[in-house]
Image (cartoon, grey):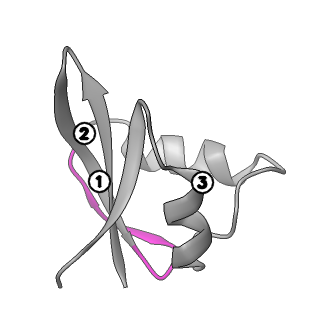
Amino acid sequence: MRILFQMYHAGELHDLGIIEDGDVVESIEEGFEGWIREELSQPTTPDLDNPDRILEAYEGPHMIAKLVDE
């Protein structure tokens, strides 16, 4: 399952990157992969291979995650 991370900036939604099965498969914005590594080091971050928990954890208002087609 592929999950796209997006962030609101200046009133617009910008793509950051895509993970699949807990791995970064596309880094659209510079620094996305490093941010994912930093997030994983936090005890409150859900496992990236659990799509439901990821979608719940990153549900706005500044950052969102959503399922994308393969």
Callout 2 secondary element: loop
- The part of the chain drawn in magenta is 20-28
Q: Which residue is mark 1?
A: 17
Nearer-N-terminus badge (2/1):
1
> In percent of the image, x 46 and y 72: which residue is there?
23
Q: Amino acid at mark 2?
A: Glu
Q: Secondary structure at mark 1?
A: strand
Foreground disc of the pair 1, 3: 3
Residue located at (39% from left, 47% from top):
64
Which residue is the site of mark 2?
A: 29
Q: Which residue does the numbered mark 3 point to in the structure image?
A: 57
Are dots 1 and 3 in contact, CB under 8 Å?
no
| Amino acid type of the residue tagged 1 in the rendering | Gly
Element assignment for label 3? helix
Identify the main secondary structure in magenta: strand
Nearer to the camera, 17 or 61: 61
Marks 2/3: CA distance? 20 Å
